[in-house]
Image: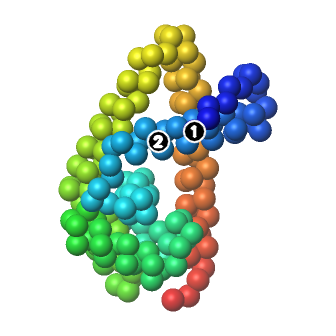
Amino acid sequence: MTVTFFHPRPEPDEVARVTSTAAELLEVLWGRASTAPASASQLRVLLVLEHQEGINLRTLADFLGSTPPSTSRLCDRLLAAGFVEREVSAADRREIRLYLSTRGRAFLADLRARREQALRAVLEQMAPAGRSALLTGLEAFCVAAAAQIHDAADASDNASDSRTA
């Protein structure tokens, strides 16, 4: 992979290009910290459940851009692996709510520790001022991304509420 150096400018297009390159490099680094026994799709489900505890299957499918049957099969495999728990909704017994299990939380914690170890080796090569600037930018990015994700989830919940089963 070729690393392109960019001149720091605040324009969103330039920042998006640099962020995309950083994400690709993160994928390479994180590839060394295997996600086994969960596939990449299953990992996405676990990450969504971590932030959207008690989400229903239809909303999860919408969130993933998938169909309910495909999402259900993903969740079946995660349930069999002990990473996910299903509960019948107290409000509507036809609705299934999804939660991370203790084992699912432990898996994500272990995966994050291995990924952070891979990142630490790179960050140690950076100058302290560069690490500080990166931290400031990433904190702002996380706040904005989390807000956008939560807004999308809320919009999806509202759309799901207006549907009939």
Determine the residue positioned at 49% across, 10% down: 128
* Residue 156 shown left or right of residue 26 in the figure: right
Q: Residues within 10 Å of mark 1 (few under 14, many from 20)?
A: few
Amino acid on which disc 2 is placed = Val
Sequence-first disc among 2 and 1: 1
Q: Quadrant of the N terminus?
A: top right
**Given the current orientation, which residue lies at the most extreme bottom position?**
165
Tell me how far mark 2 sits from mark 1, CA to CA: 9 Å
**Given the current orientation, which residue lies at the most extreme front position?**
1
Residue holding disc 1: 1
| Viewer-side residue, 12 vs 2 | 2
Q: Measured along the vertical axis of the image, is residue 22 above or below residue 90?
A: above
Name the image quarter holding residue 3. top right
Where in the figure is residue 11, as x and y percent of width and height?
79, 32
Residue 28: image tag: 2
Amino acid on which disc 1 is placed = Met
